[in-house]
């Protein structure tokens, strides 16, 4: 292909159209891969339901099996209380521990089985100075820090006590650190830390990204430290004064809700609320820690109910489904449910944290979830790419991953830039309402449990997803093969890479060019793409189906008999402006055939050299030529030729390579190869 000179103006003029068509193609690819991902999730959902039916059929047990605390050991009871953040100090007898467990929350079989899993304690942070302390502690607005301050190199708690405190606060996402005042004395003097002590850092108010406050404690007993942390965090759970406040401020049942005595500034009826009805005086630590994690997104309250009055409170609240106390009621503007009655809804920090994230996701949660989905879609498409050369295969896979993530980040930047617009905000509110309904439904609960199961077993997830991706690629490739010359090469239902852009988005420009080798294919396609950018009628060219190539005549070359291209009879006919095909066919006694009779031999037929004259007679109407105008090589005896409706013939491999690259015109006369030539045109 020669050097193509195009104007910079025409190139720039076509860039918006190219981007628009590229976006359309990307969306088409996105929806197909999204369909495959939904099929995979449906298969996982069905398999999970089948596995759940097996124990139900054998034992007749429900999906959520309640456990009697009396059947548990003392160690298991203490572990349950520790995971829920309920202090068991002063309770020695097993009966007292059982009563305390019952007052904190019901017990399920899944929660007991979760106690057997090891719980690693996160590493403690060692601050290098004031700047590091401010960056990690005071700039983090949605977490709790417990920092041990060392004065003169001495710690308040010894190593064993500090390890015990860390192990007890780690299940509630309380981060720990150590700051030595010798590294930065100015920070300790400005804070008034004259002796070794403990510092608890947490948000001050109930608004998102609120100011961080620091509180100190100087006891050397680990039990006292944990109790102090529990008491400080429990303040964040609002103590509901009575049933009327619960009805108006938390359940939204009052007509004049704006004048109710609901707590806190910025109260909104669209907020998600968690209300605990219990006989205890203080909430569990896991609920108090969640109030810090979901500051500004979820409000937490506790209504203390006296024993024997739960039935009356239940009637006044209009909630007969509450059952016995304690009960954790999750209230949204669309629906209200009782937490703990479905699979994987356990009464600990991790389980309720996942549940509330699904009900009221943060922007960062939506971003991470969409990022995972985008890369799963990209992996599905990379499995559908197949190239003989390994470097081309790797290049196309990298291009797919790059393009998916590129458009993903562009979409998010556009969303964040327009988020404050009223239309986008209304759409976000509608989407959040749909998330509330889906997360609180039975189907949403099952999907959430399946996703958690896949997250807990990543090897099973990656293995099953890889198998599904390759099977889906095999099925799609079998369904939509791409023809190449005389054979078929499986390249996938969806194109990828720069060469696919030129093939699917641009129509070829007329011209004669020799076929290139596989090593020069990418370079030629790039030159082809640049050439097409300068063509004004680039987008008006019709898309021609490739099915017509099967009807083109093909035969083995045995020469043109006595009527070669340099024959005097042929030259005489040419000088008389008559068709030389009459002379060519006269020697064989073959009558002149029309265009419809020329397709007797399919392009893919294979006639052996020993088959006599079968397939060796040139169809009527073919013009005598001694060489192929595509590769510029002389015809060898026995070579397969292919003719076009205009009468010109070429090597079969050459013309097939030409036509399947969307060059649907004759290389010589430019007559369409898919259109029969009328006699008047001849």
Image (tube, rainbow, N blue to C red):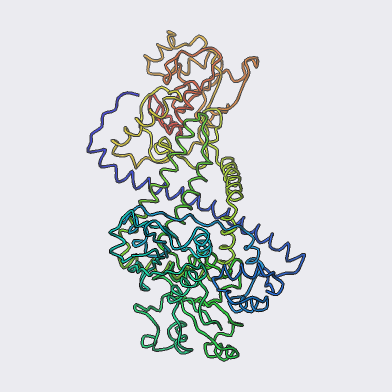
Write the residue at 35% across / 34% down: 529
Single out the residue that lies furthest toward the right.
Answer: 58
Image coords of residue 19 (percent x, y): 33, 45
- How many marks on residues? 0
Work out whether 560 lies above or below 514: above
Work out whether 591 lies above or below 460: above
Asked whether 34 or 331 is in front, the reply is 331
Image coords of residue 413 (percent x, y): 33, 54
Image coords of residue 11 (percent x, y): 26, 38
For residue 528, side relative to residue 356 (left or right) = left
Quadrant in which residue 629 is drawn? top left
For residue 648, side relative to residue 340 (left or right) = left
Work out whether 537 lies above or below 206: above
Asked whether 135 or 24 is in front, the reply is 135
Q: Is residue 600 visible?
A: no
Q: Is residue 241 visible?
A: yes
Asked whether 545 or 361 is in front, the reply is 361
Write the residue at 38% across / 25% down: 669
Asked whether 359 or 682 is in front, the reply is 359
Image coords of residue 444 (percent x, y): 55, 66
For residue 43, side relative to residue 300 (left or right) = right
Image quarter in which the C terminus is found: top left
Quadrant in which residue 477 is drawn? top right
Quadrant in which residue 110 is drawn? bottom right
Image quarter in which the N terminus is found: top left
Work out whether 82 lies above or below 514: below
């Amino acid at each position: 292909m020669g050097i193509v000179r195009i104007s910079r103006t025409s190139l720039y003029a076509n860039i918006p159209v190219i981007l628009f068509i590229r976006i359309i193609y990307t969306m088409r690819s996105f929806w197909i891969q999204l369909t495959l991902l939904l099929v995979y999730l449906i298969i996982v959902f069905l398999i999970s339901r089948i596995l759940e039916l097996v124990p139900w059929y054998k034992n007749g047990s429900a999906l959520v099996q309640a456990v009697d605390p009396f059947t548990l050991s003392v160690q298991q009871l203490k572990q349950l209380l520790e995971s829920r953040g309920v202090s068991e100090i002063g309770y020695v007898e097993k009966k007292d521990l059982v009563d305390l467990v019952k007052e904190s929350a019901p017990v399920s079989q899944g929660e007991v089985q979760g106690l057997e899993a090891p719980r690693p304690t996160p590493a403690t942070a060692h601050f290098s100075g004031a700047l590091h302390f401010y960056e990690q502690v005071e700039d983090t607005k949605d977490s709790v820090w417990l920092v041990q301050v060392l004065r003169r190199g001495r710690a308040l708690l010894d190593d064993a006590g500090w390890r015990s405190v860390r192990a007890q606060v780690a299940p509630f996402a309380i981060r720990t650190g150590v700051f030595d005042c010798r590294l930065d004395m100015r920070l300790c003097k400005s804070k008034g830390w004259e002796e070794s002590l403990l510092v608890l850092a947490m948000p001050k108010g109930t608004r998102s990204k609120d100011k961080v406050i620091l509180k100190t404690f100087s006891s050397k007993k680990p039990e006292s430290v944990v109790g102090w942390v529990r008491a400080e965090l429990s303040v964040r759970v609002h103590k509901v004064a009575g049933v009327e406040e619960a009805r108006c401020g938390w359940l939204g049942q009052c007509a004049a809700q704006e004048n109710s005595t609901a707590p806190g500034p910025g109260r909104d009826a669209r907020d998600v609320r968690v209300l605990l009805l219990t006989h205890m005086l203080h909430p569990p630590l896991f609920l108090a820690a969640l109030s810090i994690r979901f500051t500004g997104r979820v409000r937490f309250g506790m209504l203390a109910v006296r024993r024997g009055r739960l039935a009356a409170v239940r009637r006044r609240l209009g909630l007969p489904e509450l059952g016995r106390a304690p009960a954790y009621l999750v209230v949204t503007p669309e629906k209200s449910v009782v937490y703990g009655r479905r699979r994987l809804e356990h009464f600990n920090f991790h389980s309720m944290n996942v549940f509330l994230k699904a009900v009221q996701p943060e922007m960062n949660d939506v971003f991470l979830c969409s990022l995972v989905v985008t890369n799963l879609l990209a992996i599905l498409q990379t499995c559908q790419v197949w190239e003989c050369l390994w470097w081309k295969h790797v290049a196309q896979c990298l291009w797919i991953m790059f393009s998916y993530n590129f458009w993903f980040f562009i979409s998010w930047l556009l969303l964040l830039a327009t988020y404050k617009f009223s239309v986008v905000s209304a759409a976000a509110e509608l989407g959040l309402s749909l998330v509330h309904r889906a997360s609180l439904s039975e189907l949403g609960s099952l999907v959430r449990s399946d996703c958690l199961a896949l997250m807990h077993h990543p090897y099973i997830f990656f293995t099953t997803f890889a198998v599904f991706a390759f099977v889906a690629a095999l099925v799609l490739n079998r369904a939509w093969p791409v023809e190449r010359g005389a054979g078929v090469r499986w390249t996938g239902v969806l194109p990828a890479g720069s060469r696919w852009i030129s093939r699917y988005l641009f129509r070829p420009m007329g011209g004669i060019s020799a076929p290139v080798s596989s090593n020069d294919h990418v370079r030629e396609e790039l030159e082809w793409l640049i050439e097409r950018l300068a063509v004004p009628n680039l987008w008006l060219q019709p898309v021609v189906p490739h099915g017509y190539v099967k009807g083109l005549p093909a035969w083995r070359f045995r020469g043109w008999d006595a009527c070669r291209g340099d024959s005097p009879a042929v030259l005489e006919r040419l000088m008389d402006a008559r068709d030389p095909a009459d002379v060519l066919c006269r020697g064989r006694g073959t009558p002149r055939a029309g265009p419809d009779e020329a397709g007797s031999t399919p392009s893919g037929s294979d006639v052996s050299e020993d088959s006599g004259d079968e397939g060796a007679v040139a169809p009527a109407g073919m013009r005598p030529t001694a060489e192929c105008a595509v590769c510029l090589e002389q015809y060898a005896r026995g070579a397969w030729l292919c003719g076009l409706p205009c009468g010109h013939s070429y090597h079969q491999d050459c013309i097939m390579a030409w036509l399947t690259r969307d060059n649907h015109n004759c290389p010589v006369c430019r007559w369409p190869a898919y259109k029969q030539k009328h006699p008047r045109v001849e």
